[in-house]
Amino acid sequence: MPALYRHYDRAGLDVQYNARSTVPDITPIIKAYADDSRAARQSLPCALNVAYGEHADELLDIFPAATGAAGAPVLFFIHGGYWRLLSKDDSSSMAPTFTRAGAVVVALNYSLAPAATLDRIVDQTRRALAWVHAHIARYGGDPGRIHVCGSSAGGHLAGMLLADGWHADYGVPEDVVRGAAPLSGLFDLRPLVHTHINEWMRLSEQDAIRNSPALLPHGAACPLIVSYGESETDEFKRQSDDYLAAWNQRRGPGPSSGQYVAMPGTNHFDIVLTLNDPASPLTRAILAQMGLSAPTPQNQP
C-alpha cells in the first residue's frame, strides 16, 4: 500500500490514530470521568448548564474559586472524545483541586459529530470563550487571565483558540488566551482524512487544512504546556512534539515559550484524571502557568 501521510499507509494510520487501542479497557476510565465530575458538581459551589448560545448543546458548568475573591484566573477546559463522545458532564473532575488553588473552572459543552461539523464545533468553542471573557467576572473570574486546557480533540480545539484571525469576529482581544495546556492534542488533521475517524468526521482535505492548528498562524503570546500519556502512539506524541517545537521556534525563550511536561505511567485517557492530583507534575505546571500554587492534598494537614 502506498504511503498516504508521512511513511504510513491506511492501515498504519488507523493504528496510530486509534487511541482506544492503547488501553486494555476504556470503560473504567470513562466511568471515572463521569463519577468524579458528578462528585465535583455535588460537593462544590457551581453554576450548572449556563447557556453561552441558543443551541441546547451550548452550555457551561462554572465552578468559582474556593477563596471567593474576585479576579481569579480561569481554567477553560475542553473535553475530548474524538469530537463525537463525552460532554461537560464528564469534564470537571479537576474542579476540586483547581478551585481550592484559587482558580475558576469552566467545563465546556459542544455539539458532537457526525451531527455537527468540525467547523461548527470550532465556532462553538470560540463563542463559548467569548462568552466567558464577557461574563466570567460575575463568577469571580478575571477575563484577562483565561487559560485553556483540553484533552485529545479538546487539545485540538485549544489549538484552534490559539490561532490567529478569528478574534475580531467574536469580539475578543487577540490576547484573550493567557496560557494554554493542550494534552494529547491533534494539531495536523490531514492524516485523519485517511482513517476510520473520518467515518464520523467526514472531513475533506480542505476541511482538515482549515482546522489544523499546526498549519495556521499563531500569534498568541502566551505560555504553552504540552503533555501526553506515556503509552500513546508515536503519532500522537509526534503531533505534540512538533507543535511545541514550532511554537518555540517562532517565539524563542521568554514568557511565551512552551514546555513539555512528562507524565510517566499515564495513558491517553487517564492523564486527565491526574489534573485533580495536587502532586501531579502536570497539575503543578498548569497552576504555575496561572500564577497559583498547588493546594495541600485534603488528606494531609
Image (cartoon, helix red, strand yellow):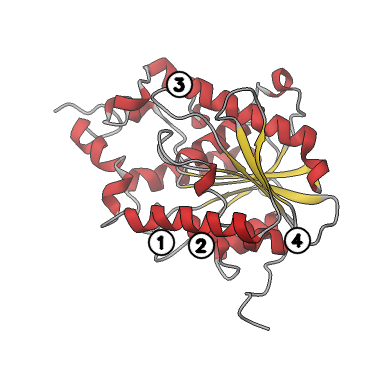
Contact? badges 3 and 1 (CB < 8 Å): no
Q: Residues within 10 Å of mark 4 (few under 14, many from 20)?
A: some
Query: Label 3 belongs to which residue?
Result: 117
Q: Which amino acid type is marked by label 2?
A: Thr
Mark 2 vs mark 1, CA separation in Å: 9 Å
Marks 2 & 1, CB-CB < 8 Å contact:
yes
* Closer to the eye: label 2 or 1: 2
Residue 256 in view:
yes
Residue 189, label in figure = none
Q: Is residue 270 visible?
A: no
Q: Position of residue 190 (x, y in %)?
A: 38, 26
Q: Pick the residue in front: 77 or 257.
A: 77
Looking at the rendered image, the quarter that the N terminus falls into is top left
Which residue is denoted by mark 4 in the rendering?
A: 66
State which mark lies toward you, 4 or 3. 4
In 3D space, how far apart are the residues under numbered discs 2 and 3 (Cα atoms)? 30 Å
